[in-house]
Image (cartoon, rainbow, N blue to C red):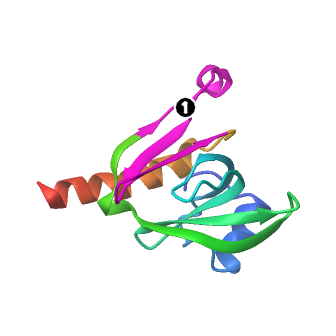
Amino acid sequence: MSKKMSNFTLSCIERGFCDERGAAFCATATKLPNGEFGMVLLAVKEHALRIYDILNMREIGELLYSVPLREISGLKSKTGVINMLLPGEVLSFDYNGAHYGFTNMYKVNEQLQVLREEAESGAEDRS
């Protein structure tokens, strides 16, 4: 990532939640396969998006899902302040017949770019 990483991002790298690219951020899950919702950590490690529960709005809990980014479809992400304020999912995709949706993300353009690049490399592999 081009900018200086935040202490939160550096901590996620050190604790093994994400790889050295630093693509880790909190969001609100609006739709997950088993009906879960609420605050989660989204972290890209290797070629997977790992979705962790957030406990008491301050502690990273158990790994809920590990989604191979090269196998997702229908990736949609909105960036910019206006899109963040509009209702609806800011990040969504489908994997293995299930829909994943997230909102309440701010200043995550660089992290979303890592996610997009991983997903696009999978689309190229499938072509």
Residue under label 1:
79
Q: Position of residue 56 (x, y in %)?
A: 88, 61
Q: Residue at x 69, y 39 (%)?
A: 104
Task: Tell which of 94 and 48 is nearer to you.
Answer: 94
Which image quarter holds the N terminus?
bottom right
Which segment is the magenta one?
76-103
Q: Position of residue 48 (x, y in %)?
A: 44, 68
Q: Residue at x 62, y 51 (%)?
A: 3
**Residue 44 horizontal side relative to residue 69, left or right:** right
Q: Residue at x 42, y 46 (%)?
A: 93
- The answer to whether 103 is drawn above or below residue 110 in the figure is above
Task: Tell which of 90 and 33 is nearer to you.
Answer: 33
- The answer to whether 31 is drawn above or below residue 21 in the figure is above
- The answer to whether 98 is drawn above or below residue 19 in the figure is above
Based on the picture, tell me whether residue 86 belongs to the magenta stretch.
yes
Which image quarter holds the C terminus?
bottom left
**Residue 126 horizontal side relative to residue 42, left or right:** left
